[in-house]
Image: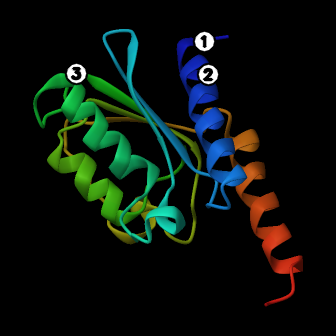
Amino acid sequence: MDTHEIYMRKALEEARRAEEEGEIPVGAVIACKGRVIARAHNQTERLNDVTAHAEMLAITSAAAALGGKYLNDCVMYVTLEPCAMCGGALAWAQLGELVIGASDPRRGYGRLSPGVLHPKTKVTAGVLAEECGDLVKRFFARKRQTPPA
């Protein structure tokens, strides 16, 4: 298993935590110089905060761990392509590399705002894409089957 897959599996663990909590199952892990410095999953329902995406929470945690706002030596692994909000935050944080699991054709940053990431951010897409995408698809399929309260 290569390094990207190892860290993406850690992000998938976070996504599964989100799912257990009734959140959209997205997880993020930030690694810096070979070690995990931040882990997060979506918490928008729990915190009643539309900005509490896994990526946003991981950025905050990583910045605190590093004692600075720039993440140019870091790699974020995220199970679903970030939205434009998260992509913008990653640009401001000057993330070194972004590794994406599944693409998000509806809300992903690439569909809404091409070039939103910092120009030096390297992007690798499709790592464990099927596993990451299936998690989100199953979540929404179950939600559609549940009758409204």
Closer-to-camera residue (2/50) = 50
Pointer 1: what residue? 2
What is the x, y in percent for residue 28? 48, 39
What is the x, y in percent for residue 21? 66, 55
**Mark 1 neighbour class, 10 Å CA radius: few under 14, some 14 to 19, many 20 or more:** few
Mark closer to the chain start, 2 or 3: 2
Determine whether 4 is above or below 62 in the image: above
What is the x, y in percent for residue 14? 59, 38
Residue sitting farthest toward the bottom: 149
Determine whether 67 is above or below 109 in the image: above
Pointer 3: what residue? 73
Which residue type carries mark 3?
Asp
Mark closer to the chain start, 3 or 1: 1
Instruction: Please report the residue visible at 75 percent of the width from the left and 68 percent of the height from the top.
Output: 140
Q: Are marks 2 and 1 in contact (CB under 8 Å)?
A: yes
| Res 93 quadrant in image | top left
Instruction: Please report the residue visible at 39 percent of the width from the left and 69 percent of the height from the top.
Output: 49
- In the picture, measured across the screen, residue 16 lies left or right of residue 64, that is right
* C-alpha distance separating marks 3 and 1: 19 Å
**Mark 3 neighbour class, 10 Å CA radius: few under 14, some 14 to 19, many 20 or more:** few
Closer-to-camera residue (122/134) = 134
- Secondary element under disc 3, as helix, strand or loop, is loop
Can I make out residue 104 in this image? yes
- Secondary element under disc 2, as helix, strand or loop, is helix
**Mark 2 neighbour class, 10 Å CA radius: few under 14, some 14 to 19, many 20 or more:** some
Instruction: Please report the residue visible at 49 percent of the width from the left and 69 percent of the height from the top.
Output: 107
Residue sitting farthest toward the left: 68
| Res 53 quadrant in image | bottom left
Quarter of the figure that contains the C terminus: bottom right
